[in-house]
Image: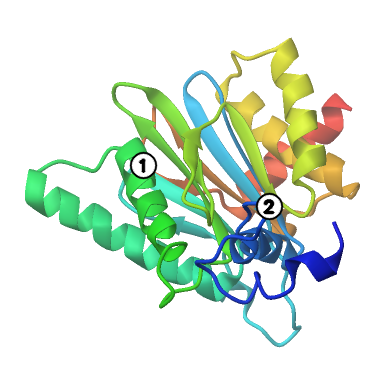
Amino acid sequence: MSRGSSAGFDRHITIFSPEGRLYQVEYAFKAINQAGLTSIALKGVDTAVCVTQKKIPDKLIDANTITHLFQLTDQAGCVMTGMIADSKSQVQRARYEAANFKYKHGYDMPVDTLCRRVADISQVYTQNAEMRPLGCSMIIIAYDEEQGPCVYKTDPAGYFCGYRGVSVGSKQTEANSYLEKKLKKKQDLSHDETVQLAISCLSSVLSVDMKPNEIEVGVVSKDKPNFRKLTETEIDKHLTAISEKD
C-alpha cells in the first residue's frame, strides 16, 4: 500500500483509514521493536519462566538499576518489552489494580483477571484522543493454585490471551517458530528444562552465546510459587547445562 493513501489517517488515533485500519495503534506495535530487545516466556508442567535481554546502554550506568522484570503481586511477575518509560507506567498501574483488587475482595487477584484489566485499560487508550497507546507489551507469568503455571500476554491494542510459549520484540517471529518446533516434540517440561529451553531459544534467535549478566530470568514454580529473579550464579548453572547438552 502506498504511503499516499494513508495520508492524514495516521495523524489521529481515533480515526479509521478507508481500509479500516488504525495506524497509530499499528505504530505502537512497531515501537515495541524499536528498543531492539526480545523477550520470551513459556511454561512447563509446574513452572513458568520469562527471559529477556539485558542491555546496558552506557558504561557509566549502574547495571543493578536496569531491569525489564517487575513483580506485580507476590505470585505474579511480568517482563516488559518496548519503551521502558511506558512499561514502568503500565507496571505501576497493574500493581495498583492488583492491590486494589486484594483490598476489595480479600484475596490475590488471579493472573488472568489482572491481565484482562491491563488489556482493558490499554484498549481505552485506543478510543480516547487524550491518551496515546503505550508502546510496550506485557507478558505476565504466575503460578495459579487452580490452573498451575500461567503465561499471559497483552499488547497495545488491548488484546490478551494465555500461551504455552510466546515471545515479543524484534526477533519474535523466529523465536515463536523455534518454540513451536520444540513444544511440538515435548510439552511436559521439568523445571530445569523449561528454564533452559527459554534461555536457549533466546540465544538461538539472537545467534549469540549468552553471558549471565546479559540476560534476566524470572521464574515461578509449584515448589516456589512466589515470583523471583534468578541470580547470575543460578543463570550460569543453566548456561553451563545448555552448553554441555550441545
Badge 2 or badge 1: first in the primary sequence: 2
Q: Is residue 209 above or below residue 163?
A: below
Image position, residue 171 (x, y; %): 79, 49
Task: Write the residue at 50% across / 28% down.
Answer: 47
Task: Write the residue at 62% across / 31% down.
Answer: 165
Front tag of 2 and 1: 2
- Mark 2 surroundings: few (<14), some (14-19) or many (≥20) residues within 10 A: few
Image position, residue 134 (x, y; %): 52, 67
Left or right relative to 117: residue 149: right
Of 244 and 131, nearer the camera is 131
The circle drawn on residue 88 is none
Give the residue at mark 2: 19
Left or right relative to 122: residue 188: right
Q: Is residue 125 above or below residue 222?
A: below
Secondary structure of the residue carrying tag 2 is loop
Task: Mark yes or no: residue 241 visible.
Answer: no
Image position, residue 110 (x, y; %): 28, 37
Which image quadrant: the N terminus?
bottom right
Q: Amino acid at mark 1?
A: Asn
Secondary structure of the residue carrying tag 1 is loop
Image position, residue 161 (x, y; %): 48, 35
Give the residue at mark 1: 226
Q: Amino acid at mark 2?
A: Glu
* Residue closest to the far front: 18
Left or right relative to 1: residue 162: left
Left or right relative to 24: residue 150: left
